[in-house]
Image (tube, rainbow, N blue to C red):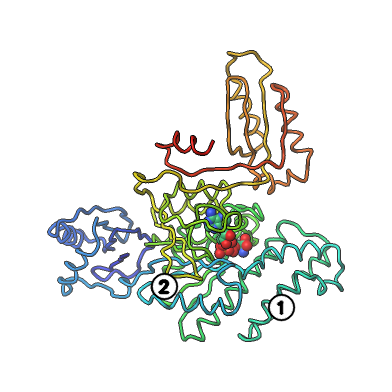
Amino acid sequence: MEIAMHLFGVQTPQPAFSRRHLHCQLLSSQKHLHFATSVASASGLRCRIVQNCRSWRVLRVSCEERIVDVLKRNKTKNQICDGALNELTCVMKFGGSSVASADRMREVADLILKFPEEKPVIVLSAMGKTTNKLLLAGEKAVSCGISNVSDIDELSCVKELHLRTMDELGIDKSTVSTTTKAIAQVKELTLRTKDYLVSFGECIALLMISMIMTNYDTIILQYDAFDIGFITTDDFTNADILEATYPAVAKRLHSDWISDPAIPIVTGYLGKGWRSCAVTTLSRGGSDLTATTIGKALGLQEIQVWKDVDGVLTCDPNIYPLAEPVPHLTFEEAAELAYFGAQVLHPQSMRPAREGDIPVRVKNSYNPKAPGTLITRSRDMSKAVLTSIFVKRNVTMLDIVSTCMLGQFGFLAKVFLIFEDLGISVDVVATSEVSISLTLDPSKLWSRELIQQASELDHVVEELEKIAVVNLLQHRSIISLIGNVQRSSLILEKVL
Ligand SMILES: Nc1ncnc2c1ncn2[C@@H]1O[C@H](COP(=O)(O)OP(=O)(O)O)[C@@H](O)[C@H]1O
Ligand SMILES: N[C@@H](CC(=O)OP(=O)(O)O)C(=O)O
């Protein structure tokens, strides 16, 4: 249970909450501090001051519920603000697959309201395959001429899906086609325009779910992520979240919640470039990262990622339909799995969860009773052998063989310096005394348009050829196994 208490009539709560800890916010009087410390120690709890600002102090106590009891018993001496005890508890992220139609949106709204004890922050992606379709529509709009924009198939498809739902909910329909018309006029689709265009997918989905929830007489607050402190780099289509995001988002969501405890609903995937102040996106599937960022920012108890499968599966169900859910994973396993091809989670999304030590639960919105996958800091590995297998496609591979003789030193260092200088990220590496085989991260290559600009890859090869014989192999795949490293011999024996 996440608890924040106002003791001794503190006026302004501070956004400094963390899981499994009770934060008592105190006025800066030594007397009050002394009192709270003695209450804590009388109930056998450890406590220490973790923040000591000008006008307030935060006392962190190592156990929650007991101290609440103790302090409640002392209610005459201490004012406990009940509203603050109802802190936001979790974040629930619903991906495109969960909100692919009006009916699905309603089911998601039902799901949110099904657990009244939860005080969730909701994160929402665009409906179904809207992002893919908007991107294709944008590309076609570059060359089709303004008068033909409405004939673009993908746009008609997106419009048809949204209009059906919007009609029902009475939402303004003009925005998306206005943007594609603007692209047709400019005859250019920059990465920045792409991000602006696809952002409508998330924004419209947010409007729609908000309408549904309001019809259910639920008080909600809508937020565009780029307006509440999601500050990113200006790498359009592949932006990184900057550290300043955490306090900004916590401050905004928390202070709004304290003054008006309505369910916050936030657009996933979007941010605001710190220099350009334009809308950015966190690379495809980035709403998972929005959810874990909010989880860490607010120090919530749990991050729930709702999908259309019963959790993280033993392999891609599109390759092997009988794949089974994996009940438990560590943050490291989930991150590896996402990075090396399992489309189910965004590769960066585990980072905030691990840093905040907040459990992530992957659930199925089509089958909410299924337990899903729980991702935590550690798990019992005693029975684990092989957990899952997956594939990453379209990988570029380089075989680099030193032109120097055996026993030369510094070869590896020189090779990696070249990659560092060119700002290229390396994935998997195998080395021998005189050769290295490595793969390059396709998403990074893609974002820098190296794949289209063959000359840039040639440049990498050119640089490497100064010290080695280089063989460039494209369209390869990496097959990865997530397993218990203590049993790697057994796993390899079976696999090979
Ligand atoms: N190992 C895996 N476990 C679960 N799902 C996987 C795996 N590999 C690929 N997938 C695919 O990922 C999809 C869910 O991810 P995604 O489409 O991003 O969901 P959402 O849009 O709801 O965020 C599943 O429908 C499934 O087809
Ligand atoms: N709509 C964006 C962001 C996202 O996270 O989507 P999903 O949750 O459906 O994977 C995309 O398709 O990339």
Q: Position of residue 227 (x, y in %)?
A: 56, 67
Picture layout, residue 11 above or below residue 422: below
Circle 2 sits on which residue? 257
Q: Is residue 431 left or right of residue 299?
A: right
Q: Mark 1: which secondary structure?
A: helix
Q: Callout 2, which amino acid?
A: Trp
Q: CA distance from mark 1 to mark 2?
A: 36 Å
Q: Position of residue 26 (x, y in %)?
A: 26, 63
Q: Are marks 1 and 2 in contact (CB under 8 Å)?
A: no
| Disc on res. 47 | none
Note whether 169 is above or below 308 in the view shown. Answer: below
Nearest to viewer (mark 1 / mark 2): 1
Instruction: Say which amino acid is labelled 1.
Output: Glu
Q: Observer-nearest residue: 107 or 404?
A: 107
Q: What kind of element bears circle 2?
A: helix
Which of marks 2 and 1 precedes in the sequence? 1
User: Which percent across, then down, holds residue 152?
Assistant: 80, 70
Q: Residues within 10 Å of mark 2 (few under 14, many from 20)?
A: some
Residue 303: x and y in percent read 43, 62
In the depicted view, which residue is nearer to us: 484 or 445?
A: 484
Disc number for residue 160: 1
* Furthest-left residue in this view: 42
For image coordinates 79% across by 38% down, the residue present is 455
**Where is residue 279, by image quadrant?**
bottom right
Residue plotted at (34% across, 48% down): 380
In this rendering, position of residue 448 left or right of residue 230:
right
Direction from residue 455 to residue 482 in the image, left or right: left
Q: Is mark 2 within 8 Å of ligand 2?
A: no
Q: In which quadrant of this rendering is ligand 1 seen?
A: bottom right
State which quarter of the image contains the C terminus.
Answer: top right
Label 1 crowding class (10 Å Cα cut-off): few <14, some 14-19, many 20+?
A: few
Q: Is residue 439 left or right of residue 153?
A: left
